[in-house]
Image (cartoon, grey):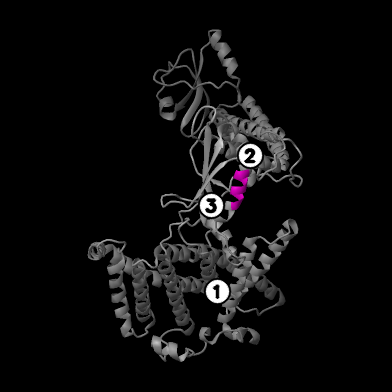
Amino acid sequence: MIVPMKKVSILILDATREASLEKLRKVGVLHLERKTVSSDALSKLMDRKNKAENALGVIGNYKAGKKAVRSAAPPAAEEHVSAQVLDLVDKRKSLQEQLILNGKEASRIEKWGNFNPAALKELSAAGVEIIPYELPAKAYAALTSETRFIVLGKDKNSVYGVAVGAEIEGEQPFILPERSLSELNATTLDIKTRLRDIEVQLGKLACKKENVKAELALLKERIEFETARAGAEDMGAGEVAVSRISGYAPEETAGVLKRAAAENGWALLIDDPKEEDKPPTLVKNNAFARLIQPLFSFLGTVPGYREYDISFSYLLFFCLFFAMIFGDAAYGTLFLAAALVIGSVFKKKSGKFPDVIKLFVLLSCCTIVWGALNGAWFAINYQYLPGFLKALVLPQFNSDVALRPFPGILKILLQIPDKQPTNTLYWNVQFLCFTTALIQLVWAHIKNIKKLSPSLIAVAQLGWLVMMIGLYFLVLSMLLQIALPGFAVYFIGGGLFAYFIFANQTGGNFGANIVKSFVNFLPTFLNAVSSFADIISYIRLFAVGLAGTSIAQSFNSMALGGGLGGPVVIVILKLFAACLILAFGHTLNIVMGALSVIVHGVRLNLLEYAGNHLGMEWSGYSYTPFALQQKEKGQV
């Protein structure tokens, strides 16, 4: 659930601004209102923060020789680590640039061999003109006998040499290097040695990354404090000058703020947020619904304060989508084993299982259940499965037998044919996909109806819900050869008509509001077509799962299709090759399944369910109270 927020304003004496902010930070419940502020102190802190982040980004790429732990160094020493790292990075960049320039210069003069440029300059100073040229072959052939030119070397396109006494008319002399080739090579070798030394020094500093992290965390708190100090609004001048601090706090913490205000002599105003206000979002859920939070954090999605918390429903449907996309119980077993091993390692270090591991355990178990019901174990053919695995297969998902009858009332209502039109498993999974779509999207409109009641607009949502039911039967008729029931057409038409009548009934003239709805006929009609497409789009769960099964079966055939007969050596080689093919094929399939979960499983929840039918924009930002997180050891 999204925790109700209160808008809070605190008036403090300007003379006690810093002391009051320190006390407010210890209270730790007020999310400060976002403001754009500036000050010299804030600029300096931001500069230090950027340097610390850059330093951490550098040494984070190095493996520390010893386990990285935070030493008991004072903040000044921690800042010194960042300065050391950035100084080494600057030196490395300068040396790398010199290395590139040396390489280019060496490449330019290597055809001339190792000569001393200073010697040519001395001859020129003594009156002997020795002018180097790199002439195209045609230009060299065109030289007259009067031109005194000594050839030093040739290649396919050019001639290298020196003109004695005078320049060659129309040709550009070769620019002499500052140093000889041997000097350049020696300098290059020295630069490479210095670069290796820098890498060693950075590697040694990597063991102090925890110090830099601590410095960075402390700087962020100081920046937050300085932002609050500079952002406090001046409300007067003179001896009784006051400042106002504004923000948001959970409704349940109002008592804490009142006590703090009474103890510190603050003037406190607590009110409900206005419509134009944008409070932060604080979501609190039970342990089960909270499992989906790691995924939300990964996606960077935060519901707006006035939007829905869909953690529970998102988690339920995502578990089903994940299981259907991977679709193989053996894969789920591997995931479960990996999750338990990784979770155990984290538990030994931190004393608890991370939520992301708990989520993965849940997804793995769902995949095992789904795969077992389908008889999917590394895509092995049903007839080769052991008896105890065959016993787990749900009859409706067994493609080796005829279509099992549905419950009588469901069969009559849906007019499901006695004779299966397509492959049993495929037909049933497609039917499940479309039914899942109906359940999830209808649930979205039920939430909208509940939120909008008792407004007349809730009736429009009810009309859209009824239309969705009609569209569901239309999809079944078109794609699964189920006879279209007569009421479906009335549901579609009647639901859409009800939406037009009540969609804009926000007050005022009833008839005029109806006209407004029909003015938007085309966009509304296109949205209805989009809803039809939304139901069909759930077929992606079947299609992706089928693709994964086909890929796995193909690799199984490649690995084992040729049999294992022959001499012992040949059998061993065939087994080795089969293991490699199976390992590669199923690993590839798992990777593709993971991508499909992100592309398809997440999309159905975020776009079709939350976006198109719940109307969520995920426009929120997280509740982050002004609170002391780090224990300061000295002035930063």
Q: Nearer the viewer, residue 553 or 548?
A: 548
Mark 3, residues whose alpha carbon is within 10 Å: few (<14), some, or many (≥20)?
some
Q: Nearer the viewer, residue 49 or 623?
A: 623
Q: Residue furthest top?
A: 126
Mark 1, residues whose alpha carbon is within 10 Å: few (<14), some, or many (≥20)?
many
Quarter holding the C terminus is: top right
Which structural element holds mark 2? helix
Label 1–label 2 contact, CB within 8 A: no
Q: Tag on residue 622?
A: 3
Q: Tag on residue 327?
A: 1
Type of amino acid under label 3: Ser
Is 340 one of the magenta-colored residues?
no
Give the labeled residue for mark 2.
22
Say which quarter of the image contains residue 635. Answer: top right
Mark 2, residues whose alpha carbon is within 10 Å: few (<14), some, or many (≥20)?
some
Q: Which residues are magenta?
A: 255-262
Vertical position of residue 588 compared to residue 392: above or below:
above
Which numbered disc flags the more N-terminal residue, 2 or 3?
A: 2
Which structural element holds mark 3? loop
